[in-house]
Amino acid sequence: MGRVIGVLWAAVTLIFIFASRECFAGTLNDDRINDLLHMQARSTDGVIRLDDELLRKYANPSPEPRPYSLIFFFDALQLRDNSELKLEELRREYAVAATTYVKGRNGGSGKVFFCELEFKQAQASFAAFGVNTLPHIKHLPPGSGSLKEADEMEQTDSHRTAEGMISFVESKTNVKVGVVERPPAVSTKQLVIFAGGLIVTAPFVIKRIMAKDTVLHDSKFWCVGAGSGMQLGAEGFIVGALYSVVGVLLAFVTHFLHEIRSKAAQRFVMLLVMAIGFTAVRKVISLDHWKTGYWIHGFWPNSWR
């Protein structure tokens, strides 16, 4: 009887030990995930900055395997000036990829974390990963694998953009990162100021154009340099400036007009651009007529008459 009780007691003890171990491991992983999420939230670009000590803490598979993936960007501030490496440009693209993930629906899931290792603060980590050259991006999958088993991203042109980095992460983690939303080249505030300036000046400009009271309607302006050998240069400059106006307006409509949220403002700016573009092209045609005597005529097909 005593022997049976001893066996039962030993079995209960083993079950308690394993249960305690699982509970401790689960608590440890929960704490690590919460810490990483906190550091991710405090980062301005979604990238967690690690050193040798923090890497050992969050990449260590003991006592239980890692339940998350870690993406590492290896950087060296002293090499940022090397134009061939383009580390600063790649770091910006990496930040765009990290920000895209954080803002996506999986950003707070704790499944993937974008990290950064800087050489001066993580020399031992560089050696542990076997990184001897830059640029370098690696993926450390969940589990108990060592750092040297991390997957390396190919350094091709297609992978040197945020979109290429996201493709690499999604293929390795099976986690949807999201669609890249790059910051506009012109801020919304700048667009509002520009559109406001157009709206305020448009009535005066149109009025002067309709009254033929602009510098372009002054015959003296078109005769600048006449008799001094500069007329051809002045004419070329003026016509080039008119073409440039049309080109700039088209570029604005193509790249920036969609940033204006108000549909009414979009329509007004579009009509204003069309009016200015039409006036510029019409002036180029009239200059050609004044210079050569030729004029542009429209002709209906004979079958339409």
Image (cartoon, rainbow, N blue to C red):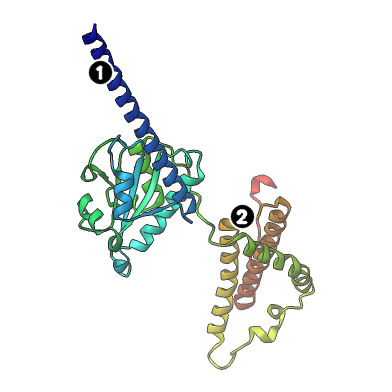
In the depicted structure, whether residue 122 falls above or below residue 41? below
Numbered marks: total: 2
In the depicted structure, whether residue 213 falls above or below residue 39? below
Q: Amino acid at mark 2?
A: Glu
Query: Of helix, strand and loop, which one carries label 2?
Result: helix
In the depicted structure, whether residue 99 falls above or below residue 109? below
Please report whichever mark, 2 or 1, sits nearer to the chain's N-terminal start. 1
Which residue is label 2 attached to? Answer: 259
For the point 51% across and 39% down, which residue is it? 105
Residue 277: which quarter of the image?
Answer: bottom right
Q: State the image coordinates of residue 18 (x, y, percent, origin top left).
A: 30, 25
Is residue 262 in sight in this rendering? yes
Residue 167: which quarter of the image?
Answer: top left
- Nearest the viewer among 32 and 275 is 32
Which residue is label 1 attached to? Answer: 10
For the point 28% across and 61% down, which residue is it? 119
| Apparent side of residue 109 relative to residue 140 in the rendered image (left or right) | right
- Nearest the viewer among 228 and 15 is 15
Residue contact between numbered discs 2 and 1, judged by CB atoms under 8 Å: no
The crowding category of the residue bearing disc 2, from other C-alpha atoms within 10 Å (few below 14, some 14 to 19, many at least 20), is some
The crowding category of the residue bearing disc 1, from other C-alpha atoms within 10 Å (few below 14, some 14 to 19, many at least 20), is few
Query: Of helix, strand and loop, which one carries label 1?
Result: helix
Q: Amino acid at mark 1?
A: Ala
Between label 2 and label 1, give the one nearer the viewer.
1
Q: Give the quadrant of the N terminus.
A: top left
Q: State the image coordinates of residue 170 (x, y, percent, origin top left).
A: 38, 39
- Nearest the viewer among 99 and 57 is 57
Instruction: Tell which residue pokes out farthest to the front in this image.
Output: 2
Q: State the image coordinates of residue 243 (x, y, percent, origin top left).
A: 57, 69
For the point 67% across and 62% down, which residue is it? 192
